[in-house]
Amino acid sequence: MIKRFTNKTRASALCTGVFLCLLFSTASRADEGQLSGVNNEISRQQQQLSASSKKLNTLQADLKKQEQAISSVATQIRAASLKLETIDDEIAILNQESQRLEQRKLGQMELLKELLNSQYRQGEHSQLNTFLSGEDSNDLDRMTVYAERLSKARTDAINELAATDTELQLKRRMLAEQTQKQTALLDALKADKATLEKQQHAQKKTAGAVQRQIRNDKSYLSELRNNQNRLKAEVAKAAEQARIAAEQAKVKMDGLGRYKGKLHRPVKGKTLHSFGSTQTGELRWNGMVISSKEGAEVKAAHDGTVVLSNWLRGYGLMVVIDHGKGDMSFYGYNQALLKNVGDTVKAGDPIALVGNSGGQTQSGLYFEIRRKGNATNPSPWLGR
């Protein structure tokens, strides 16, 4: 009886063990399946993110080319515009000279009329008439000499005026031709710029779509941090250039310490983003963004030496000026750069043109001040 119970118990335990093994085996296979699914999803998302990042990198490279091309055209347009202004000034001066000469010509014409009348009246008393009338020939000689001198003076004046007028007309014609050429050049450059901006707009639209995708994948913060790191790396490379330039500079490199509240405003406009405000997540703005009209001149905040003038991802076309003693100012988002590395500038000198490079959605200036490598609020440093 006892033996039969024991065998029955062993059989029951064996069945229970087999059931548990089957249960654990099924659960293990389910866990393995879930883990495989999770790994596949992670791999898919990583591949998607990697593809998006590669696409963004390609678009950023294209964007750089487009914005550098726009910078070149915008610089040429500015040079052509300045030359056109010079020609216009010269034409205005020539018009004034022409009017003055016309008045002088009218005066000389009146004088000519008087001389002709005098000569006509003198003709009534010719040498023959004087001889027949018995008048003194000495008086006649004096009048003849006087008339000859007046006639010569009149002829000389007319010839001189004609020569001057001819020269003036020739110069005005040359300037008119130059103005026509400059106007045609300016129109062509504007057309080229419009074409490039259209292409740039398409590139920015695509880049914006990829950036939104990356932002959704929580990689936008990483992109912004990478942009800041790129800027730091570029500034670090420029440090040695800054030291050499400081030794050769013909401007004061005494830093910004004594000029707080007196720096020249780089542009006039509304502040879109202030220093320290949230950029995204826990990342904050290291500088300020000032709204300004595209193509407006960006002015140097203080005397210094240009140590960086190039395109940087996230900042577009940027100028960095070293002011000495570890103080630097940064000017980003520009349409065109007017200064090169090594150039010395004075406060208020044009250094760039306002734009929206770097993938910005509107024109404006990114302005930053760093002291010994640390970003500081630029607002209190600017004058009114």
Image: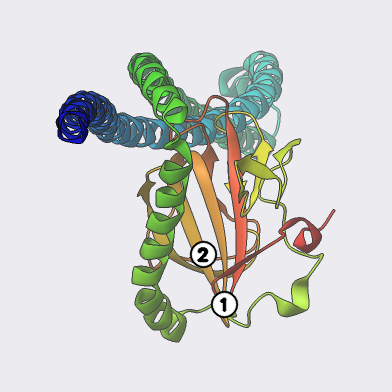
Which amino acid is tagged 2? Ile
In the current view of this chain or complex, which residue is farthest to the right?
384
In the image, 167: left or right of 6?
Answer: right
Q: Which of 200 and 50 is in front in this view?
A: 50
**Residue wearing tag 2:** 321
- Residue at 15 percent across and 35 percent down: it is 3
From where the camera sits, is residue 316 visible? no
Q: Quadrant of residue 372?
A: bottom right
- Residue at 65 percent across and 13 percent down: it is 120
From where the camera sits, is residue 86 visible? yes
* Above or below, 33 relative to 351: above
In the current view of this chain or complex, which residue is farthest to the front?
1
**Residue 196 in the image, given as x and y percentages of width and height:** 34, 20
* Above or below, 320 relative to 298: below
Q: In which quarter of the image is residue 31?
A: top left
**Residue 190 in the image, given as x and y percentages of width and height:** 41, 18
Give the image's coloring scheme: rainbow
- Closer to the camera: disc 1 or disc 2? 1
Spatial separation of the CA atoms under disc 1 and disc 2: 13 Å
**Residue 71 in the image, given as x and y percentages of width and height:** 38, 36
Nearer-N-terminus badge (1/2):
2
SS for callout 2: strand
* Above or below, 129 relative to 269: above
In the rendered structure, find residue 372 and report the number of the disc placed on it. 1
SS for callout 1: loop
- Residue at 36 percent across and 75 percent down: it is 241
Which amino acid is tagged 1? Lys
Q: Which of 56 and 140 is in front in this view?
A: 56
Q: How many C-alpha atoms fall within 10 Å of the one at disc 1: few (<14), some, or many (≥20)?
A: few
